[in-house]
Image (cartoon, rainbow, N blue to C red):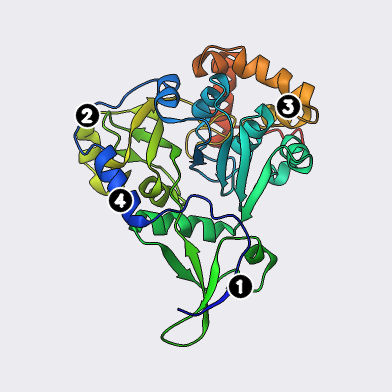
């Protein structure tokens, strides 16, 4: 195959598909096993220093906050992050000093709320390296290739852009047409965490609303931690099998975590906690402020339940539920 052009970004998370398939065949159980555990147990069991990690959801929607908190509490360090629309989650981990490098699609900002001071400070200061860049679609299709067990997928994107130059993609001559086509290499995260609407004890999981790339990410990750708003009986899921987005055999741990996307949104259940996001953005303007946030909400709490009490408990959560149901208007302190 004639290679026309190559990006100069680091090839993050790639390995021979046969090696990945062999690892998963040997290490991933296909048995119906009860995989319920706490967030602390899941992080201790499955996330190690230096791992390549990825999170589900999109932007501030459906993030797996209990796992982020436990990474910080357990001081898992030198992580590399696949940053596809990774905003608060990545910013929090960078601000806490857990991240060494990132492949960037959309990161270092909080969407309409503004830029991400902690991430930008540490990137610009050289504490965290941008290893490669990609478009949102390109990073999603890297997971797709891995989930299919193939070394790459072809696409008609990024060619001729600065993003391509900083990516790990290649442009080759299509053997059928002779035209240039972009090849996006597979990406196998060591661990992914995905927050879902409900799951059973085995890991079968349902995502209400848009699943984004989470089904592909679930198939690509070597280890998968599912956090769920609720754990339900398997018979409830079997009554509507088409609704299951992630099958049990891809899952290593199931963590019951009501309000587990806070301060992000959980579609159809609760809205963004805009005041809390604004507090993080303001405090993270300095290292001392970021440390104050971490001590108050994460390091200073024993678990996610205590964190929820610290941010306002039932009253705050009821307010976020009412906003999501259009029963009251949201306040935007950053506006």
Name the secondary structure under disc 4: helix
Question: Which of pointers 3 and 1 lies earlier in the amino acid sequence?
Answer: 1
Label 4 belongs to which residue? 21
N-term mark: 4 or 3: 4
Q: Any mark on residue 121, and which?
A: none
Task: Of the two numbered discs 2 and 3 on the same chain, state the one appearing first in sequence.
Answer: 2
Q: x%, y% of residue 182?
A: 52, 72
Q: Can you identify the residue that label 1 sits on?
A: 159
The alpha-carbon separation of the residues under discs 4 and 2 comes to 21 Å
Label 1 – label 4 distance at C-alpha:
30 Å
Q: Secondary structure at mark 2?
A: loop
Instruction: Specify which label sits upstream in the sequence, 2 or 1.
Output: 2
Please state which of the two labelled residues, at mark 3 or mark 1, is closer to the viewer: 1
Q: Is residue 106 visible?
A: no
Callout 3 environment at 10 Å: few (<14), some (14 to 19), or many (20+)? some
Across and down, in percent, residue 255 comes to: 39, 26
Q: In the image, which disc is placed on residue 279?
A: 3
Q: Quadrant of residue 60?
A: top right
Q: Nearer the viewer, residue 145 or 315?
A: 145
Measure the alpha-carbon separation of dots 3 and 1. 39 Å
């Amino acid at each position: 195959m004639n290679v026309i052009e190559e990006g100069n970004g680091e090839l993050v998370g790639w390995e021979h598909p046969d090696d990945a398939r062999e690892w998963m065949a040997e290490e991933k159980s296909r048995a119906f096993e009860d995989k319920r555990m706490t967030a602390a147990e899941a992080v201790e069991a499955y996330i190690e220093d230096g791992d390549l990690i990825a999170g589900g959801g999109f932007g501030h929607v459906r993030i797996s906050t209990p796992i982020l908190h436990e990474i910080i509490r357990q001081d898992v360090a030198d992580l590399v992050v696949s940053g596809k629309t990774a905003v608060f989650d990545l910013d929090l981990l960078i601000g806490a000093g857990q991240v060494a490098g990132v492949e960037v699609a959309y990161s270092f900002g909080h969407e309409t709320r503004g830029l991400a001071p902690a991430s930008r400070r540490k990137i610009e200061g050289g504490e965290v390296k941008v290893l490669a860049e990609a478009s949102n679609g390109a990073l999603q299709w890297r997971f797709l290739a891995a989930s299919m067990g193939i070394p790459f997928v072809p696409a008609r994107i990024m060619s001729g852009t600065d993003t391509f130059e900083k990516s790990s993609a290649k442009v080759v001559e299509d053997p059928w047409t002779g035209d240039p086509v972009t090849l996006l290499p597979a990406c196998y995260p060591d661990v992914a965490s995905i927050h879902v609407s409900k799951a059973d004890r085995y890991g079968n999981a349902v995502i209400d609303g848009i699943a984004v790339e989470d089904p592909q990410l679930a198939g690509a990750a070597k280890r998968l931690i599912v956090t769920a708003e609720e754990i339900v009986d398997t018979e409830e899921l079997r009554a509507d099998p088409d609704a299951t987005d992630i099958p049990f055999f891809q899952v290593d741990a199931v963590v019951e975590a009501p309000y587990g996307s806070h301060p992000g949104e959980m579609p159809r259940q609760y809205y963004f906690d805009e005041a809390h996001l604004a507090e993080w953005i303001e405090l993270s303007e300095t290292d001392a402020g970021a440390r104050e946030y971490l001590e108050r909400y994460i390091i200073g709490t024993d678990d996610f339940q205590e964190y929820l009490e610290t941010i306002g408990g039932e009253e705050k959560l009821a307010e976020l539920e009412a906003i999501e149901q259009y029963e009251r208007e949201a306040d935007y302190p950053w506006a």
